[in-house]
Image: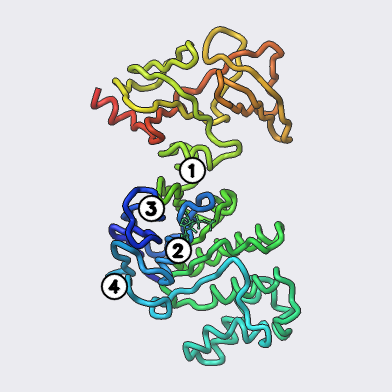
């Protein structure tokens, strides 16, 4: 197990990158703590695989260094990095039994057979394959084969880190939940450094202690699931995490007053004079319907009943704005305003959250 440090790391697939968009990974500095369970989350093309491939050694970065603890591994091949990897699609030896597939990484390292048998039994129990240990992998379903891949990834306890690249894509939904839970248990038990790439927020939030959100080649925020929900540092984080995501509404902010579509609301903090594209970010959970003159003008387009609450889809001016109405709370027919909770109303300039404490000091 080890700490992984990215130092001034950047990558372009082009030989002579010139403009910002030529870089698949923009310059970044980051530390993945020893024993951390991380999810690397972002939409397609944001650079997750590029970053993972640099950590695993499949790709040498155009710039910067990668360290495992004190050791510079930037130019070391995958085999020399002592990591385990689980990919999107199964990697198993068809002609071997499930048992031999699971034992392979251990025997490769020369582990004594008695220890191999013990460890294989533990991992087989974890992936629910104790009864199939003596079957050949050939002929098993894709789902079962992927469970073997996961088992193989987790069988060695002496690896520096385990890297998972969208490992549950081919697994059926029920098993997905079970495997995620087991991965988390395994992490608690053995404390491996784990990095789990996904574009699925549920997978990321249930697996990881720390979620690293990428957008357009940058890490825009790394934090606990709660921090990403409460304080999205970038509008993309607000929008990507949550269901539905955070509402982002154009506004003018002056001191502690925000003006939207001619309506004014008071903010918790003073922001001085802001320059750039200014927006408010408010999660649907923190908007309250009203029939009075306070708050922002709101036009409801439709109501979705999702069981434990209702989601209102509607507009503030031209901006799409969703509101979550808790179970049992009425929706007045003449509701035409929404009132944001000031404690959960964030201000963004050019998509980055303005820290109220800093803005207040600067004002
Ligand atoms: N081998 C390659 N050659 C050239 N460009 C590439 C290559 N691999 C990725 N890219 C580009 O680099 C950027 C980041 O891609 P990357 O695959 O790392 O993103 P991702 O977040 O993993 O996406 P996905 O979830 O679709 O795999 C994208 O613009 C992609 O088109």
Secondary structure at badge 2 equals helix
Q: Earlier in the sequence, mark 2 or mark 4?
A: 2
Mark identifier at residue 71:
4
Mark identifier at residue 226:
1
Residue ID for mark 3: 22
Q: Are marks 3 and 4 in contact (CB under 8 Å)?
A: no
Q: Earlier in the sequence, mark 3 or mark 4?
A: 3
Q: Residue at x 60, y 81 (%)?
A: 102
Quadrant of the rendered image containing residue 75: bottom left
Q: Is residue 284 above or below residue 337?
A: below
Q: Earlier in the sequence, mark 2 or mark 1?
A: 2
Q: Nearer the viewer, mark 3 or mark 4?
A: 3
Q: Residue at x 69, y 14 (%)?
A: 332
Residue ID for mark 2: 52
Q: Badge 2: how crowded within 10 Å, few (<14), some, or many (20+)?
A: some
**x and y percent of residue 41 in the render?**
50, 52
Marks 1 and 4, how far apart at CA: 33 Å
Q: Earlier in the sequence, mark 2 or mark 3?
A: 3
Decide which of 304, 317 is in the foreground and name it: 317
**x and y percent of residue 275 in the render?**
32, 25
Marks 2 and 3, how far apart at CA: 19 Å
Q: Residue at x 58, y 26 (%)?
A: 321
> Quadrant location of the C terminus?
top left
């Amino acid at each position: 197990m080890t700490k992984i440090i990215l130092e001034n790391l950047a990558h372009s697939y082009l030989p002579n990158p010139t403009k910002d968009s030529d870089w698949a990974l923009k310059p970044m500095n980051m530390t993945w703590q020893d024993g951390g369970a991380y999810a690397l989350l972002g939409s397609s093309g944001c650079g997750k695989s590029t970053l993972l491939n640099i950590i695993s050694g499949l790709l040498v970065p155009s710039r910067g260094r990668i360290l495992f603890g004190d050791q510079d591994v930037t130019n070391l091949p995958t085999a020399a990095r002592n990591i385990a990897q689980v990919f999107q699609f199964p990697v198993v030896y068809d002609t071997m039994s499930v048992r031999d597939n699971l034992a392979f990484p251990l025997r490769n390292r020369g582990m004594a057979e008695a220890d191999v048998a013990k460890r294989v039994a533990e991992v087989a129990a974890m992936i629910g394959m104790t009864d199939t240990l003596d079957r050949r992998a050939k002929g098993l379903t894709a789902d079962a084969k992927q469970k073997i891949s996961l088992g193989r990834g987790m069988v060695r306890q002496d690896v520096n880190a385990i890297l998972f690249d969208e490992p549950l894509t081919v697994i059926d939904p029920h098993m997905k939940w079970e495997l995620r839970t087991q991965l988390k248990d395994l992490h608690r038990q053995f404390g491996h450094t784990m990095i789990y790439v996904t574009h699925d927020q549920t997978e990321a939030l249930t697996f990881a202690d720390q979620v690293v959100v990428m957008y357009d080649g940058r890490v825009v925020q790394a934090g606990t699931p709660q921090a990403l929900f409460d304080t999205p540092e970038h509008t993309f984080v607000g929008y990507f995490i949550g269901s539905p995501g955070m509402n982002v509404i154009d506004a003018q902010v002056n001191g502690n007053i925000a003006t939207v579509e001619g309506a004014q609301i008071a903010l918790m903090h003073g922001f001085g004079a802001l320059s750039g594209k200014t927006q408010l970010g408010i999660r649907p959970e923190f908007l309250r319907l009203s029939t009075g003159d306070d708050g922002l003008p709101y036009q409801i387009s439709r109501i979705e009943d999702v069981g434990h609450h209702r989601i209102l889809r509607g507009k503030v001016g031209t901006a799409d704005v969703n509101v979550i109405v808790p179970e049992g709370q009425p929706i007045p027919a003449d509701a035409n305003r929404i009132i944001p909770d000031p404690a959960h109303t964030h201000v963004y300039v050019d998509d980055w959250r303005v820290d109220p404490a800093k803005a207040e000091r600067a004002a």
